[in-house]
Image (cartoon, rainbow, N blue to C red):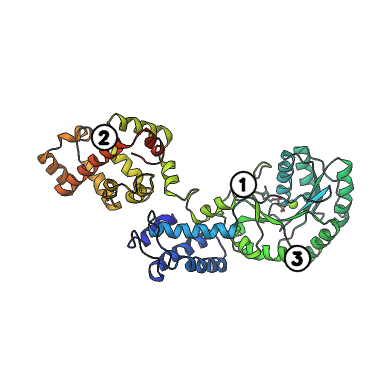
Amino acid sequence: NLTEKLTSVLKDLRGHGKLTEKNIDGALKEVRMALLEADVHYKVAKTFVGEIKERALGHEVMESLTPGQQVVKIVNDALADLMGESHEDLVLAGEKPVSVMLTGLQGSGKTTTAGKLALYLRKKGRKPFLVPADVYRPAAIDQLKKLASQLDVPVFDSEVGMDPVDICRSARAAAQQNGCDTLILDTAGRLHVDEELMAELVRIKSEVAPSDILLVADAMTGQDAVNIAKSFDGALDLGGVVLTKMDGDARGGAALSIKAVTGKPIKFIGTGEKSSALEPFHPDRMASRILGMGDTLTLIEKAAEMVDEKKAQDLEKKLRKNQFTLEDFRDQLVSIRKMGSLGDMLKMLPGVSGNKQLKNLEVDDREIIRIEAIINSMTAEERRKHAIINGSRRKRIAMGSGTSVQDVNKLLKNYTQMMKMMKKFNKGGMRSLRGMLPF
Ligand code: GDP
Ligand code: MG
């Protein structure tokens, strides 16, 4: 993942120091690759990376972070600024009944989304009314009518050959008669953006004055999404976007591209063919998806993910009873190795940063691998009772693990030091540790 890549690219710049052009160039390349892999438009990616560079240059590396993590943080912050922090809902302001107009290319998912939104609105206590305004394909009208009856949502009785502007106009009165307050207009699409399509949509817009106009865009269109969104936004001044087919391989780069180019929010994502497969879009979560950083960014959150509650409780018990064996120690190191470096983990814990003993506990990633090897070379009894590991045993273990006696000594010292430290944590301290730190 990106965090790992950046961490390895920037490994030399441990601890403090400023990010400079020289040491972040490699990292920025990785960021750019990650964006492109997520199908972000190449121009958008270029601009974005440029901005990150500006932000990163001269940036102090925080004590608690490695430079790689620092860059990830900058990237994440920049993404949050670009994408916005929270979900933007449908705009339903105005005199009832209001209209929500769905636009987009053929096959992008308009009709499906119309049904999804009807369900969504009904859950929010609104009374939706579905309007088939795609009059060029008989199947399109039938599709929405069928969907409406499945969902038990009233639908306008459009017929092939009717003028879509007339439909939308008449639908308003029909909605009122049905006691509905929110019309969902399912408009026609083309295989490509063309003037005729746009002209029709513009006429519907000026006739109906929808409270929200959404572009329904297929996330799988990747690079094309930018041009599609630009055209629709240029003609209609969109209120937002629904990105469909996010359940597929699409990594969501389209969301970033569309927001960057149009400034319009992604309001929902479609995650399946069923009418329930609609999710409010949360830009903050999307950012991590795009960059493959997982859903959480901080080390602490990562740690919490890795160590489940039950395991953490077991460990706490073991620590209390002083039964935390070298075997447990090894298992924890293995899970730490997956998260980043031990030193950085420790520094992030409350009450640890000021602690001299723990600060001296320098364990780097290669060392974790070495420690693993050493513990693997011990007998089960040795792992349970470290006190029996005498000089000759140390020699044997060093030989078996391809390390030196000094390495073995150091490991045992670290282990006992950590045991001592852990015992000092009071109950409260333990509780705050639980779920965060795996030992
Ligand atoms: P329209 O031409 O824009 O009205 O598109 P449709 O609503 O008819 O959808 C086209 C195809 O895409 C259909 O087969 C839908 O089932 C499918 N579809 C729509 N939205 C989604 C989605 O979010 N995920 C998946 N997997 N398929 C979708
Ligand atoms: Mg349709």
Q: Which residue is mark 1?
A: 271
Mark positioned earlier in the residue sequence (3 or 2): 3
Residue reaching furthest to the left: 392
Kind of residue indicated by mark 2? Thr
Q: Which residue is mark 2?
A: 325
Q: Secondary structure at mark 2?
A: loop
Tell me the distance, in whole angstroms, between the alpha carbons under discs 1 and 3. 28 Å
Residue 10: x and y in percent read: 37, 62
Q: Nearer the viewer, residue 320 or 38?
A: 320
88 w.r.t. 53: above or below: above
The residue located at (83%, 47%) in the rendering is: 97
The answer to whether residue 387 is seen in the rendering is: yes
Q: Is residue 435 left or right of residue 269?
A: left
The answer to whether residue 138 is seen in the rendering is: no
Residue 414: quadrant of the picture: top left
The residue located at (75%, 42%) in the rendering is: 147
Residue 426: quadrant of the picture: top left
The residue located at (22%, 33%) in the rendering is: 380
Local crowd size for mark 3, using a 10 Å CA cut-off: few (<14), some (14–19), many (≥20):
few
Q: Nearer the viewer, residue 262 or 198?
A: 262
Mark positioned earlier in the residue sequence (2 or 1): 1
Query: Cβ of disc 3 within 8 Å of ligand 1?
Result: no
Mark positioned earlier in the residue sequence (1 or 3): 3
Kind of residue indicated by mark 1? Thr
Tell me the distance, in whole angstroms, between the alpha carbons under discs 2 and 1. 46 Å
